[in-house]
Amino acid sequence: MEDFYREQRRRFDILMDGSDPVGNRWNFDEDNREPPPKKQSTLGLPAPYRPREDDIDDQVRRDLDRMSLDTVGVDGPRLFAVTPAEARRALTRFVDHRLPAFGRYEDAIMRDDWAMSHSLLSVPLNLGVLHPLDAVEAAERAYREHKAPLAAVEGFIRQILGWREYMWHLYWHFGPGYTDNNELAARTPLPTWWKDLDADAVTAQCLHHALKGVRDRGWTLHIQRLMVLGSHALQRGYRPDELTEWFATAYVDGFRWVMPTNVVGMSQHADGGLLATKPYTSGGAYINKMSDHCGDCDYDPKKRLGEDACPFTAGYWAFTHRHRDLLARNNRTRRAVSSMDRLTDLDAVLEQESARDRF
């Protein structure tokens, strides 16, 4: 992806000084991984653009009600731009008021700030009412006009010009059979509470708020998708084909070309490494660092055994044990296997996790 991203930058002359990248760096990801600020419940940014509903929205609701569709989630006023005019206003508001803070807390999660500094442009982008280059060039102008820092602008551009476009090409490259991949032999069906978005049935605060975001808005931050929902599904061995279908239908930006590579490849490692070099999962320590959820949670991210053992911490070791041979052969994950082999309570953790029926 990094090679692809650099070629995209050269091809469209984005953030370039001649043949060199602006700032002499292609990637400012290391500057964009800060945990949420302490002693703050929100970032305190101006609110994202919010569209006004009209008679068309009312008519669409009446039409959908007559269809008696099998739906999930809460119906409420629209939160996302769905027309070209709305998309332009959403982009302008993001660039003018939120882009400067984007990047620094790009991978963080805050319970009382569901949008944080994110653009919320994935819906109009995926609907085709906002051209990706329009978003990219607007962000670059903000940097050139000294209205936003380079790390924030580069991080935003990389998500669109890099990752999003890479996913588009890989969707066509891998073909329609890609969602059949299941290299980790994950066979567990999605539980009812997951499919029904029953966030109130979930105790773990990170998982509760992620499901609540899908239920109430049809949208969550990308880290909630990957390192909360995706990581939980990976640890528990949920079927990747069912999970892909769920992401594609429960999320308002979950179009059919977007989710297969993001879920099967990036999130579930079900393609055996065609897309990503390692499975993406973690214990509760990562979630504790990058969110403000764990302080109010009944589970302790430091504990892997006992009534208050974090299901992510314990689940991480259960996953590592289940796939130890695969992980031991991978330079990026072999340390996890070595650490697991030093655990004196591993058998008890595995027994606990095999019987766990609540999260």
Image (spheres, rainbow, N blue to C red):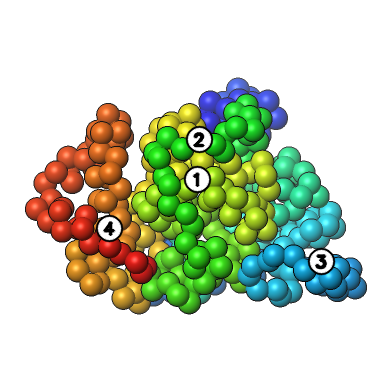
Q: Amino acid at mark 2?
A: Asn
Q: Is residue 39 left or right of residue 341?
A: right
Q: Residue at x 76, y 60 (%)?
A: 81
Task: Residue 326: tell me if it is visible.
Answer: yes
Q: Is residue 175 left or right of residue 355?
A: right
Q: Quadrant of residue 352?
A: bottom left
- Is 249 located above or below residue 48 in the figure? above
Residue 292 percent coordinates (x, y)? 39, 69
CA–CA distance in space, label 1 to label 4:
20 Å
Instruction: Please state which of residues 166 and 100 is positioned toward the viewer in this rendering.
Output: 166
Q: Is residue 58 left or right of residue 207?
A: right
Q: Which residue is mark 1?
A: 240
Q: Is residue 179 left or right of residue 128?
A: left
Q: Nearer the viewer, mark 1 or mark 4?
A: 4
Q: Which residue is mark 2?
A: 181
Residue 236 percent coordinates (x, y)? 37, 53
CA–CA distance in space, label 4 to label 2:
25 Å
Q: Residue at x 60, y 37 (%)?
A: 167
CA–CA distance in space, label 3 to label 1:
29 Å
Q: Which residue is mark 3?
A: 67
Bin the neighbour count of mark 3 within 10 Å (Cα to Cα): few under 14, some 14-19, many 20 and up.
Answer: few
Are the residues at dot 1 and dot 4 in contact (C-beta closer than 8 Å)? Answer: no
